[in-house]
Amino acid sequence: NGVMSSKGSSEVEALQEEITAVQRGREAFSARVSLDIAATGTRIHLAIRDEAAQRETSQASVRGALESRSKEALELHRALAMDREQSIGSGLLRTEVSRLHAALEDERKKRAEFEKSFIQQLEMQSATLRK
C-alpha cells in the first residue's frame, strides 16, 4: 500500500509541476502579450504623432503657398489697376489729341478761307486802283 501511495504522490507531484509549468507559461504568454500591446500602442502613438507633425508641416506649407499666391494676386491686381488707369489715361489722351487735331484742322480751314478772302479783296482793290 505504501508503494501505491508513493506512486500516487509522485503522480500528484508530476501533475502539480505540470500545472505550475502551464501557469508559468500562461503568465509568460500574458506578459509577452502585454508587452506586445504596449509596444503596439507606443508604435500607434508615435505614428499618430508623426502623422500630426507631417500634417502640420503640410498645412504650414500650404499656408505659405497661399500667402505667396495671395501676394502675387494682390500685385497682379495692382498692376492691372495701374494698367487700367494708364489705359484710361491713354484713352483720355487720345481723345484730347483727336480734339486738338480737329481744332487744328478747323483753324487751317479758317485760315485757308481767310487767305482766299484776303486775296480776293486784294485783287478787287488792285482792279479798282488800275481803273
Image (tube, helix red, strand yellow):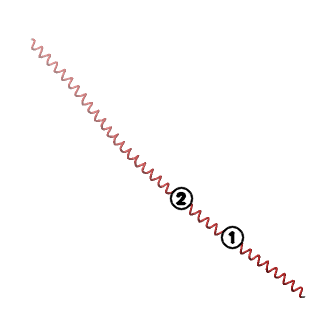
Residue 88 in picture, x, y percent from top left: 33, 40
Which residue is at the front of the view, 8 or 66? 8
Q: CA distance from mark 1 to mark 2?
A: 32 Å
Q: Is the Cβ of the residue at disc 1 closer than 8 Å to that at disc 2?
A: no
User: Height in image: 105 above or below 4?
Assistant: above
Residue 90 quadrant: top left
User: Height in image: 73 above or below 128?
Assistant: below
Residue 19 quadrant: bottom right
Instruction: Give the residue at x 22% y 28%.
Output: 107
Give the mark nearest the N terminus, 1 or 2: 1
Instruction: Give the residue at x 31% y 40%.
Output: 89
Q: Amino acid at mark 1?
A: Val
Secondary structure category for the residue under label 2: helix
Residue found at the far top of this picture: 131
Residue 91 in picture, x, y percent from top left: 32, 37
Mark 1 surroundings: few (<14), some (14-19) or many (≥20) residues within 10 A: few
The residue at which mark 1 appears reads as: 33
Residue 63 in picture, x, y percent from top left: 47, 55
Instruction: Give the residue at x 77% y 76%.
Output: 21
Secondary structure category for the residue under label 1: helix
The residue at which mark 2 appears reads as: 55
